[in-house]
Amino acid sequence: MTARLLSVDDEIQLIAAGTAAAPGSTASTCAPELAEGPWVFDLQSPTYGPGASMADPLPAEAPRQGVLPEEYTAASKSELDTRIRRAKETLGDSVVVLGHFYQRDEVVQYADFVGDSFQLANAAKTRPDARAIVFCGVHFMAETADILAQPSQAVILPNLAAGCSMADMADIDSVEEAWAQLASVYGSEPDAEGRVPIIPVTYMNSSADLKGFCGRNGGIVCTSSNAATVLEWAFERGQRVLFFPDQHLGRNTAKAMGVPVERMPLWNPRKPLGGSTADELTDARVILWNGFCSVHKRFTVAQIERARAAHPDVRVIVHPECPMPVVDAADGAGSTDYIVKAIAAAPAGSTFAIGTEINLVQRLANQYPQHTIFCLDDVICPCSTMYRIHPGYLAWVLESLVDGVVLNQISVPASVAEPARVALERMLAARP
Ligand code: 13P
Ligand code: SF4
């Protein structure tokens, strides 16, 4: 059984202060700078800030957060707590606060709904009277919520620098260019069964532009919960799939469906034909965009071996954004929702080693003290972009709403939102 763990933020603060971590907690972080307020990094380009995605380059056009007023950066935890609760009370049902599973506990405590990205976008639909949806997640999640929300609702991302390094690895220009090159190899004629040469599939973790691209080109969106169903949908209609941006989710899912790894070339947008020959592309079943999640890339087979040596009865569950050898070595792989449900359904006294973002793992460990639950990686390395949402930003956007000012609105233009909605609706209609 696990002793109650500190929040990820509290542990990071202790580590940065050089204080011994609490019993049962891990003792190091990949980026001690995370202990600083995210506003210290918001104005610094060109990286994402400290943490698991700090080495990924920030695209020039990625949104940047302006200066957070000093009254929020200087406020104590308890002052922010009072101000957030007061603003929420004043706003009542006119606002709904959404918190992603990976969000820090210090923010999740104010969320009306906590869930994965798609659950949250749908949760917002259950509150059509809320004029503002404050999305404590990352940019692509707020875009999806805006696409699915009522036109009268404003979706707010408390810190505009909360992007997703993986989503930013595939931009619309590179995907359009890849599509043109693939068309030059495949042409556009269907085969004898009426299947077109290639279908684009984008992971939910992508910009609205890419969802729109899929809507316009006979393609579809998937989440990590329904990727296999979506690939089946695509194979019924196409001879091949172009899957972006996450190579690992694409590879792990297609491999489990029996697609040989040799028939899944990687598309490198900086090379002609993505780095493959025309013959290799003709033989391909799934072309995998060269993207990855810096958080999930940290998990290794060696970590799994260590967990098994220390806990012979351990059940290892990882997210399918982990590299293929890690998924192969685990006992199970699935979305954040799958992980949450697997733990909820386990008999008391179970032991789990989890390969996903640390805020979710530590929260689960605290929610289920009857189990032993720990993160495969013993270095504390949260999703640094999700971490950009600090209570200071939440207080700022909520108090501004009280004053009638909508800050940081994420608004997807209709020309993108309409085809993106088509691709999302195809996903909803796809059934196993
Ligand atoms: P979900 O789709 O499960 O919310 O996961 C989002 C994510 O960012 C995973 O890395
Ligand atoms: Fe993006 Fe990875 Fe963070 Fe998820 S965990 S939001 S994929 S960087």
Image (spheres, grey):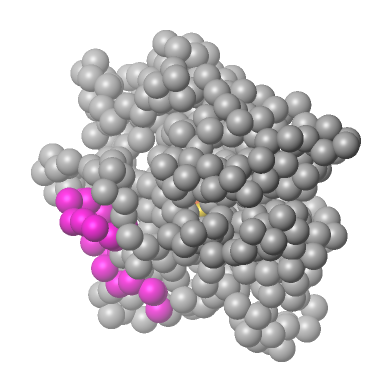
Toward the viewer: 374 or 339? 339
Q: In the picture, residue 113 is in which quadrant?
A: top right
**Residue sitting at x 59%, y 20%:** 126
Span highlighted in magenta in the image: 28-49
**Residue sitting at x 40%, y 21%:** 413
Considering the image in quadrants, where does the C terminus appear? top right
For this orientation, the residue located farthest to the bottom is 309
Q: In the picture, residue 131 is in which quadrant?
A: top left
For this orientation, the residue located farthest to the right is 193
Left or right, 226 with reference to 21: right
Residue 12 drawn above or below residue 69? below
Q: Position of residue 3 (x, y in %)?
A: 57, 70
**Residue sitting at x 31%, y 55%:** 58
Toward the viewer: 121 or 278? 278
Q: Is 338 one of the magenta-colored residues? A: no
Residue 171 drawn above or below residue 317? above
**Residue sitting at x 78%, y 45%:** 239
Q: Position of residue 248 (x, y in %)?
A: 62, 61
Toward the viewer: 353 or 332? 332
